[in-house]
Amino acid sequence: MSAAIISAAVCADADTGSYFELAARAGRDCLTRAELEPQRIGLVLNAGVFRDHNISEPAVAALVQKRLEVGLEYRTGRVPAFSFDLMNGGTGLVHALMAAQCFLELGDIEYALVLSGDTHPSTERTVDGFPYTATGAAMLLRTASGAGGFGEIQQIFTGPGQATAWVDLAAAGTSGRRALSVRPAGDPLRAAAEAVTRCLDDEHLELARSGAILLAPAPTTDFAARLAERLAAPADAIVGVDPNLGDPYTAAPVHAYLAAQAAGLIDDTRPVLFLAVDGDAAACIAYRPCPFAPVGIDVNLCAKQLDM
């Protein structure tokens, strides 16, 4: 058992700075693209770090789950829904995809919705000193038998692992729920290149026009180009985030995935490497799609076809 990507969506609407709303809109769009009703979701997993009013409890995943109307009623025949936050800085989405696959492999649920994205706790669209673009993202995964799925995570740390964001309660006073202090992060290029190289070696893949495609995040506008040069990889094997968007932080891999999809680079056979970074850390995971599992096709049927 493994996991297949069924659909993905992002939301960067300018009329709201609420991560809850941005993630919910991305989630609804994701379900609409897959023509899936919310009650069929068995797991909602949030990898976003920066959220409205610095809320820590209840879990953001549960708050977005409510907005999406996933598993709000427990009745005989209904899929019980479970939700939780999995935060690991900018690399959280990669770990969330692996965690979702682990749940799907158990066979108790059929669909998992992975959310990511960030916003300033004040919910204002732009705040001086806050380096990330307010956005929400969602990926829908489905249980698949023998259809590839995600491999092992390769994670690299090259820095001391110091905090890059915190709330200075003494300075914030009574405005702590709207405050956030951020220090400049390191350059993750070295860590990213090493994580990608290890992932390629472990999966016996190569970045090439007809080979694997790498989804690059956007800590800087030129990061994808710099990474391609460091890896000595063809530029058309690496897809990044639209430079006009800025840095969507935890949602960056989903933005890159949709950019690659819009460019016609995502197909039923081409392996995809999801890369996420945070300061001096990077995490990379390979995804092997099911060749016969476009949206609306039973991925279990695909597995049977592969076995023939």
Image (tube, grey):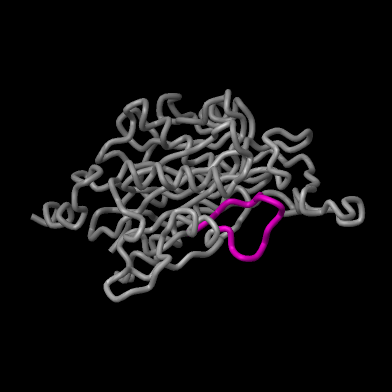
Using residue 225 as the reference point, say whether residue 57 is left or right of it.
right
User: What stretch of residues is rendered in magenta?
Assistant: 45-60
User: Which percent across, then down, holds residue 95?
Assistant: 51, 56
Q: Is residue 78 above or below residue 11?
A: below
User: Which percent across, then down, holds residue 142?
Assistant: 31, 56
Residue at (32, 67) in percent of width and height: 109
Q: Residue furthest left?
A: 308
Nearest to the observer: residue 229 or residue 24: 24
Using residue 299 as the reference point, say whether residue 194 is left or right of it.
right
Using residue 198 as the reference point, say whether residue 207 is left or right of it.
left
Q: Is residue 95 above or below residue 135?
A: below
When asked about the image quadrant of residue 212, the answer is top left
User: Which percent across, then down, holds residue 216?
Assistant: 51, 36
Indicate yes or no whether the magenta region holds residue 244: no
Q: How many marks?
A: 0
Q: Residue furthest bottom?
A: 76
Indicate yes or no whether the magenta region holds residue 52: yes
Residue at (39, 55) in percent of width and height: 151
Nearest to the observer: residue 24 or residue 300: 24
Residue at (53, 48) in percent of width and height: 116
Residue at (40, 42) in percent of width and height: 29
